[in-house]
């Protein structure tokens, strides 16, 4: 991703910049994603919260 100001800052992809760690409350898996009520990739539960 190029900066429009011309300073050449490259932050990476949108997913890398805005992704947060989430933890599934059912199976305790930690995964990255962004959004609200993400389904767990392992058990497909939507009982997930942002991991601290």
Image (cartoon, rainbow, N blue to C red):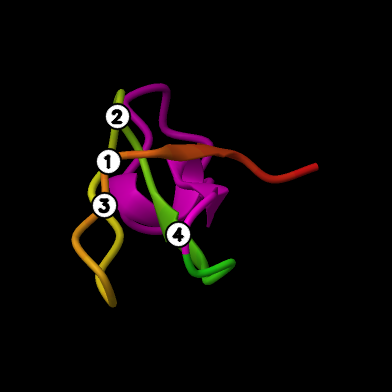
Closest to the camera, between mark 3 and mark 4, is 3
Work out whether residue 27 or residue 33 is closer to the camera in this orientation and state it. 27
Span of residues in magenta:
1-26
- Disc 1 is placed on an element classified as loop
Q: Which label's residue is closer to the chain start, 1 or 2? A: 2
**In this rendering, the label closer to the viewer, 1 or 2:** 1
Q: Among all residues in the image, which is located at the extreme right?
A: 52
Q: CA distance from mark 1 to mark 2?
A: 6 Å
Q: Earlier in the sequence, mark 4 or mark 1?
A: 4
- Taking the spot 23% from the left edge, 49% from the top edge, the residue there is 39
According to the image, label 4 marks what residue? 32
Whole-percent x and y of residue 23? 57, 54
Earlier residue among tags 3 and 2 = 2
* Residue carrying label 1: 46
Q: Secondary structure at mark 3?
A: loop
Return the mark for residue 37.
Answer: 2
Q: CA distance from mark 4 to mark 1?
A: 14 Å
Q: CA distance from mark 3 to mark 1?
A: 4 Å
Q: Which residue is mark 3?
A: 45
Give percent across and percent down for residue 47: 39, 39
């Amino acid at each position: 991703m190029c900066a429009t100001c011309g300073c050449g800052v490259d932050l990476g992809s949108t997913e890398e910049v805005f992704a947060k760690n989430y933890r599934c409350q059912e199976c305790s898996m930690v995964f990255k994603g962004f959004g609200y009520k993400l389904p767990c990739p392992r058990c497909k539960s939507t009982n997930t919260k942002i991991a601290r």
